[in-house]
Image (spheres, rainbow, N blue to C red):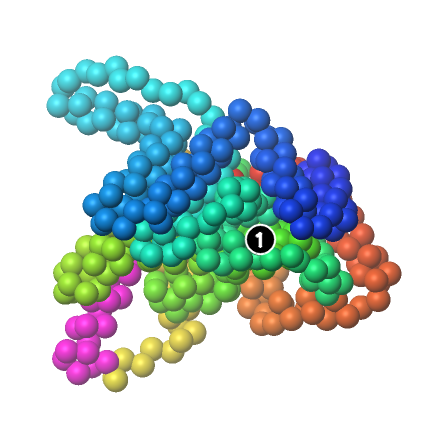
Amino acid sequence: MLFNSAAFAVFLPCMLAVYWVLRGGSRRWALLAGSYLFYSWWDWRFTSLLLISTIVDYSCGRAMERRREVGARKWILCVSLVTNLGILATFKYFGFFADSAAAMLGMFGVGADLPTLNVVLPMGISFYTFQTMSYSIDVYRGAAAEKSLRDFAIFVACFPQLVAGPIMRAGDLLPQIKTEQKFADSDMAVGVYRLFRGLFKKMVLADTLGVYVDEVFAAPQAFTGVSAWIALYAYAFQIYMDFSGYTDIALGVGRMFGLRLMENFDRPYLADSPRDFWRRWHISLSTWLRDYLYIPLGGSRRGRRRTVINLFVTMALGGLWHGAAWTFVTWGVFHGVLLGLQRAWGTVTGRIGLGWRWRVPRELKIIVMFHLTCVGWLMFRAPDWGVVSSMLSGLVDFSGDVRGLRYGAIVCICAIAHLLPGLDELAERFGRLPALTRGAMAAVCLWACILLTPETNAFIYFQF
């Protein structure tokens, strides 16, 4: 079920009414049933994968809590990781690795017709797989295992953040699930504000920019100069407005049910360095990669060379997490290289005593980092390297092509909105308005979304 669909417009108020009428365990059962209905609306067959991950990780958590022997706990953890990664690899990466292996064998003159799986990628599989894996790893590290299968199942399947995050930790979400939430008008008002803000960002801004982006990336050789630059900037703001719009909706809907989900964005295009960018973009994933991959690899504790390698490996796997294509891997490697260069540059300038002399204005660093990010988005968006090459050629070919100027105006609107501080404070002000005024503003926003959106599209991160 899509957040920007008619089905969800019916589902949400019905779910809210049932949830707040019930009490105690009945309320939690209703939230669990609603979450499975939400997910199965897309394709009920894939709910079995959600159920498998839930049962396996719940059982492994309970088993690890009962066993104190390190060896036994490691084997139980392996069962959890192998199950989750096995499901993810089968449905998301089997065809990619098979095709890559066949291509590599072909380079050596060996023909190979390797089997592939022609299956649809289950929606949100990367998100809930990482969420359940973090639970198993935390229990292995000493966290308490959840005793209620029902509450753990809600943690895995909680519908506001099930399909595209944020990736929640059990220690943050499970206590909220187990607490009897009390209805608060302020929570409902903030939730409505973020819901409609997210819908506007997705349907009016992101989907409109997507029309031009799709046109350019479908025939990049036909767009040069200003038009190509507009397309590059348009995709940067399309993916931001699309994904942050989803996050706004997820956090808003969660707030309506008394749940506070973690923020996933902090104005990422104001980052002044690669490290700062990943503190601001997809925060739940970047912290997951840090805590469950980068630090276990050794982090920055084993010397400069090993630190750079760890960054490189972490970001390459982060790129692969996004999609089964070499362009995604290259995008991750690109950011890994940027992070490694930043760390190496800081070490060099510090050693030779130049750190205090190199006072680059922060505004210039932000501009440079934004354009490096855009280069990365080019790899992320392009379906193959031919498109990347054509787009790069178009960016340096100023032959008078000025199509797409109206989309450039939308890019400017997005940039201004991104620069403005304190937008989240508007939620609190919205909550203090009379209920009738709030309803009228929500109705106007919904009317604008329906009227101005070119077509209903799935969120970009649903494919991951």
Q: Identify which residue is drawn at 46% across, 49% down.
A: 146
Image spot of residue 213 (x, y percent)? 52, 43
Q: Which residue is mark 1?
A: 177
Residue 63 in view in this figure: yes
- Name the element at disc 1: helix
Q: Residue 222 magenta-drawn?
A: no
- Please name the amino acid that badge 1 sits on: Ile
**What residue span does the magenta drawing correspond to?**
338-355
Q: Identify which residue is drawn at 17% across, 73% down.
A: 348
Q: Identify which residue is drawn at 71% across, 43% down.
A: 15
* Viewer-closest of 461 and 88: 88
Placement of the N terminus among the 4 image quadrants: top right
Image spot of residue 103 (x, y percent)? 23, 25
Left or right: 402 as drawn, with respect to 257: left
Q: Is residue 125 above or below residue 426?
A: above
Image spot of residue 26 (x, y percent)? 68, 44
